[in-house]
Image (tube, helix red, strand yellow):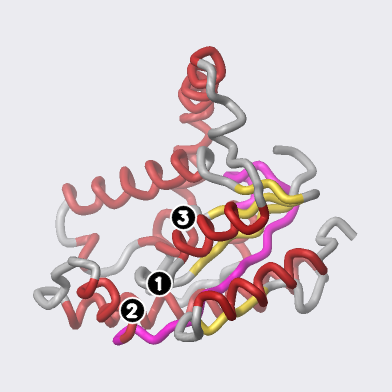
Amino acid sequence: MKNKTVVEIIGISGSGKSTYLRKLKENCEAKSFFTKRKNIKRKIRFILKNIINFPRDFFLLAIIFDYFLDDVHKESVIKYLNRFIKIYKILVLSRLNRVKINNFIIQESIVHLSINLNKKSSTKFIKILKKLYRVDRIFFIYLDIDAETAIQRMNDRGDNLNICLESLKKRYFLASDFYRLLLNDVEDLENKKNSNLTLNSKYPIDTNLYLLNSWICSKDLKA
């Protein structure tokens, strides 16, 4: 994916990332990466490509893995390894579920799981992320929502989060802070102001989809 721009949808769990990506496909009548490769030969090629690229992906992900960890993940080796496997799995699956529009690709990948517990600079994270995604530029669509509303949404859809409520809130607060830092720093790195989009996830989905589609239609991220 050389010389490409990725626009990644980010936000804490319950903000609606998957819903917006799905609606975006429907509204824009865009075909996903997966639907373009229906035949078995293409699927096998995709699998082989990921196997070949695994050492590179592993190395790059290891460099920024600390950005995805909180104290809970460091309690045991099993939790640490499970976290790495989860991040890597999402990375690979996101390559099967993208929307290509004009000169850029919209996806939901691993950034929404970033935490940055140690308050480190996001510059390194962004630079490694572009290498991991194999793109030249990256911008974000941020679905902003408070932790309480997001948790309530997840409980409403069947997730029982009451057991780990406080640790989850802490993680979501840290993640939200890091998202805002990323939005500012990526614009500085790309030297392109106002290229990210922030949507209030509490607003009706139709309202936000109108804003999102208007933003997409007006963007020339290649310029």
Q: Secondary structure at mark 1?
A: loop
Q: Amino acid at mark 3?
A: Ile
Residue identifier under label 3 = 110
Residue 221, x across and y down, in percent:
81, 61
Residue identifier under label 1 = 12
Residue identifier under label 2 = 150
Disc 3 versus disc 2: distance between alpha carbons? 18 Å
Residue 92, x across and y down, in percent:
46, 39
Q: Secondary structure at mark 3?
A: loop
Q: Amino acid at mark 1?
A: Ile
Query: Which disc, if any, is residue 196?
Result: none
Please determine whether, in this image, residue 56 is positioned above or below residue 182: above
- Residue at the outermost right position: 223
- Residue at the outermost top position: 41
Q: Which residues are magenta?
A: 129-148
Mark 1: few, some, or many residues within 10 Å (few <14, many ≥20)?
Answer: many
Q: Earlier in the sequence, mark 2 or mark 1?
A: 1
Disc 1 versus disc 3: distance between alpha carbons? 11 Å
Residue 76, x across and y down, in percent:
15, 55
Residue at point 51%, 76% (across, down): 205
The front one of 119 and 169 is: 169
Disc 2 versus disc 1: distance between alpha carbons? 7 Å
Q: Are marks 2 and 1 in contact (CB under 8 Å)?
A: yes
Magenta run includes residue 219: no
State which mark lies toward you, 1 or 3. 1
Please determine whether, in this image, residue 179 is positioned above or below residue 3: below
State which mark lies toward you, 2 or 1. 2
Q: Amino acid at mark 2?
A: Ala
